[in-house]
Image (cartoon, rainbow, N blue to C red):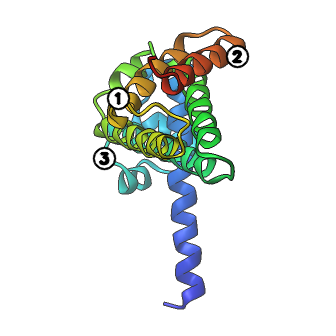
Amino acid sequence: MPKLWSETIEAHRRDVRQAILDTTAALVAEHGLLSATMSQIAEETGIGRATLYKYFPDVESILFAWHEQQISSHLQELEEVRLRGGTALERLERVLERFARISHQARGHHDSDLARFLRRDDHVAHAQDRVQRLFAELIVEGSEAGDVRDDVPPEELANYCLHALNAAASLRSKHALHRLVDVTLSGLTSQPE
């Protein structure tokens, strides 16, 4: 098979898969978790059911794939923010701020049937571990620069950040979100006398 042909087929498969994910997420958001069927997803996507089953065996697997894609996107976003220039403390603050925004943007989904369903996904625990490691690495860098407290192990401080900033999901305003980040950062930088 010529290279151009295989690249075209692969691009088509990626596009179809993405259309399936997007359609399913939209249907669930509009009609609820239990209303999405494979027939409905195929029809809304504009493909046959047989084609849909070549990609995914059931609605649950589509939702988990969509969720994994969302998580991966958020993790990549945090890594990109981390790699921007600045001092260790500035980079830590930017990553904390971005994580809080991500949590805040997802606030409408936290109490939904979909959120309860997706919490079973192993990707959630894996993502939280990666975020916590990212926080811990930035905390170590900040501590080595003398800007972040060193009297508490970095892993504990990272856990503190993760749980504190998850509260952003329940906040009603961006001002409250900024205050939460400021308070969290203050807890990382102030040391007892």
Q: Which residue is mark 3?
A: 57
Secondary-structure class at tag 2: helix
The answer to whether mark 1 and mark 3 are in CB contact below 8 A is no
Marker count (numbered): 3
Q: Earlier in the sequence, mark 3 or mark 2?
A: 3
Looking at the picture, how far across and down is residue 124, in whole percent? 35, 35
Secondary-structure class at tag 1: loop
Q: Which residue is mark 1?
A: 152
Of circles 1 and 2, which is in front?
Answer: 1
Residue under the image location 54 percent in, 91 percent down: 2
Q: CA distance from mark 1 to mark 3?
A: 47 Å
Looking at the picture, how far across and down is residue 85, in whole percent? 68, 53
Q: CA distance from mark 1 to mark 2?
A: 29 Å
Vertical comparison of 188 with 55: above or below: above
Is disc 2 surrounded by few (<14), some (14 to 19) or many (20+) residues within 10 Å? Answer: few
- Residue 110 vs residue 23: left or right? left
Quadrant of the rendered structure where residue 68 is?
top left
Q: Which residue is mark 2?
A: 174
Looking at the picture, how far across and down is residue 64, in whole percent? 37, 39
